[in-house]
Image (cartoon, helix red, strand yellow):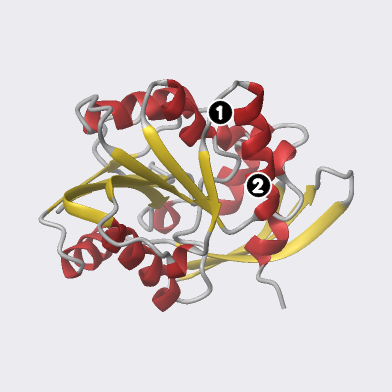
Amino acid sequence: MKQWYEELFENYGKKYDSENFAQGTMGECDFIEREIGFDRSLKIIDIGCGTGRHSIELTKRGYNVTGIDLSESMLVRAREKAAALGLACDFQQHDARALPFAGAFDAAIMLCEGGFPLMETDELNYAILKNASTALREKGTLIFTTLNGLFPLFHSVKDFLASSTQEGNAVYGNNSFDLMTFRDNSVTTFEDDSGNMKELTCTERYYVPSEITWLLKSLGFKTIDIFGAKLGAFSRGDALTTEDFEMLVIARK
């Protein structure tokens, strides 16, 4: 039986690119460049690359990027977009919970909940972080965003998602946040690229900063910095607050 995230992304590449949360690519890549010192000799892995928006933009800027995703449908879309731009991007189908890379990359990015924290258990989410860590070389950098567990303690996830949804985007409803597991369970309704309406029961794990810090320290990261994640405007100047739906994490080995 397929998990909800596998069903969601199996025929959703074109629709995905029009979603509100996918519109911040340029500014996010600006931030990544600053964090890696504009060093185009570095090898980057984009985990959960989806339709390749960050991989493609960084490749355009002269970086060596390998994009990996579980969904072949999303990768097909990514390859189409890269080909249309005349770019030779390296897109590979892999499961982030079982990556074949060890010490192969200088930096790893994992943005917009491309894998972590969508898994159905904490152990599987941890496996993604562990594999990202393993893929990095000594002194490697991991940059990722994840759902901020401080947000649902003060706000309604349902109301926030409804307020940020535009016409034609996926619609989220029947949200219920479990304080014991920090999971939000919801029903997502969306139209796939073939015009079929689908309804999926989803579960996503929210993390508090202290959890993320402990998990990354257990994987050997020496410095862990956490900030608020503003769409298309990542910045070390944005302290994480209860108003941030996502957190931005920068970890170095």
Name the amino acid, label 2. Answer: Met
Residue under the point 63% across and 37% down? 79
Name the amino acid, label 1. Answer: Gln
Question: Disc 2 vs disc 1: Cβ atoms closer than 8 Å?
Answer: no
Residue 199 or 80: which is nearer the viewer? Answer: 80
Crowd around label 1: few <14 · some 14–19 · many ≥20 (10 Å): some
Say how many tags the image has.
Answer: 2
Q: Can you give x and y, in whole percent of width and height, for residue 238 in the image?
A: 26, 32
Spatial CA span between label 2 and label 1: 16 Å
Residue under the point 51% across and 45% down? 49
- Is disc 2 placed on a helix, strand or loop? helix
Q: Is residue 138 above or below residue 96?
A: above
Q: Which mark is residue 74?
A: 2
* Residue for badge 1: 23
Residue under the point 36% across and 61% down? 101
Location of the N terminus by quadrant is bottom right
Residue 105 or 88: which is nearer the viewer? Answer: 88
Residue 226 or 103: which is nearer the viewer? Answer: 103
Q: Can you give x and y, in whole percent of width and height, for residue 131 in the image?
A: 35, 65
